């Protein structure tokens, strides 16, 4: 749970750094990803403080949807054919790469990695909870 919270904080601060310090304008898909990531930093923080082992019930839907969005966004940037299906029609195009570290690391890929870490951590937590409940029964 702590790993998930730290991941959400880093992702949130990273996105704020890119937009507020580096002045990268978020595209539509970036905003949607933020909608799913920012609450996770708060929800997971409260869960860590309260030691809420059932937090996966309300984190998993957010992290899975965020993972799907950021995965699609990454593919949109890396596969030119998909750009014809781009949803960003005004403002910054979703296919624009602000960063391209090592030729493949982009902002949506960073978000995808963060959502994946959170999702996997929550699945592990859920399995542990179910195993504990089964052993008590």
Image: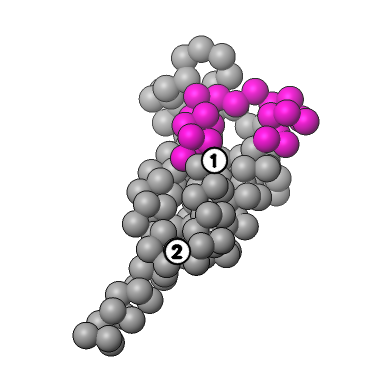
Query: In terms of sequence position, does the residue under pointer 2 or pointer 1 come before the other?
Result: 1
* Quarter assignment of residue 126: bottom left
Marks 2 and 1 in Cβ contact (< 8 Å): no
* Percent coordinates x, y for residue 39 in the rendering: 50, 42
The secondary element bearing badge 1 is classed as helix
Look at mark 2 in the image and give the residue it sits on. Answer: 52
Mark 2 vs mark 1: in front: 2
Report the residue at 54% width, 47% height from top. 42
Report the residue at 35% width, 74% height from top. 129
The secondary element bearing badge 2 is classed as loop
- Estimate the spatial distance between the alpha carbons at disc 2 and disc 1, rounded to whole Å: 19 Å
Does the magenta run of residues contain 67? no
Q: Spot the residue most to the right.
A: 21
127 on left or right of 101? left
Look at mark 1 in the image and give the residue it sits on. Answer: 38
Q: Is any part of residue 75 visible from this angle?
A: no
Q: Spot the residue most to the left.
A: 137
* Percent coordinates x, y for residue 87 in the rendering: 42, 22
Q: Spot the residue most to the front.
A: 50
* Percent coordinates x, y for residue 121 in the rendering: 47, 65
Prevailing secondary structure class for the magenta stretch in the rendered image: helix
* Percent coordinates x, y for residue 92 in the rendering: 58, 19
Residue closest to the eye, 120 or 13 = 13
The magenta segment? 16-36
Q: Is any part of residue 91 visible from this angle?
A: yes
Residue closest to the eye, 85 or 22 = 22
Report the residue at 22% width, 85% height from top. 137
* Quarter assignment of residue 20: top right
**Vertical order, 83 against 119 (above or below):** above
Report the residue at 34% width, 57% height from top. 57
56 on left or right of 13? left
């Amino acid at each position: 749970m702590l790993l998930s919270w730290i991941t959400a904080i880093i992702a949130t601060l990273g996105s704020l750094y890119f937009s507020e310090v580096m002045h990268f304008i978020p595209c539509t898909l970036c905003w949607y990803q933020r909608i799913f990531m920012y609450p996770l930093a708060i929800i997971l923080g409260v869960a860590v403080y309260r030691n809420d082992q059932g937090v996966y019930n309300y984190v998993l839907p957010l992290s899975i949807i965020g993972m799907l969005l950021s995965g699609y966004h990454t593919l949109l940037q890396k596969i030119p054919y998909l750009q014809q299906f781009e949803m960003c029609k005004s403002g910054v195009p979703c296919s624009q790469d602000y960063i391209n570290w090592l030729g493949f690391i982009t902002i949506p890929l960073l978000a995808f990695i963060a959502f994946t870490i959170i999702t996997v951590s929550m699945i592990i937590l859920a399995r542990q909870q179910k195993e504990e409940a089964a052993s008590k029964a």
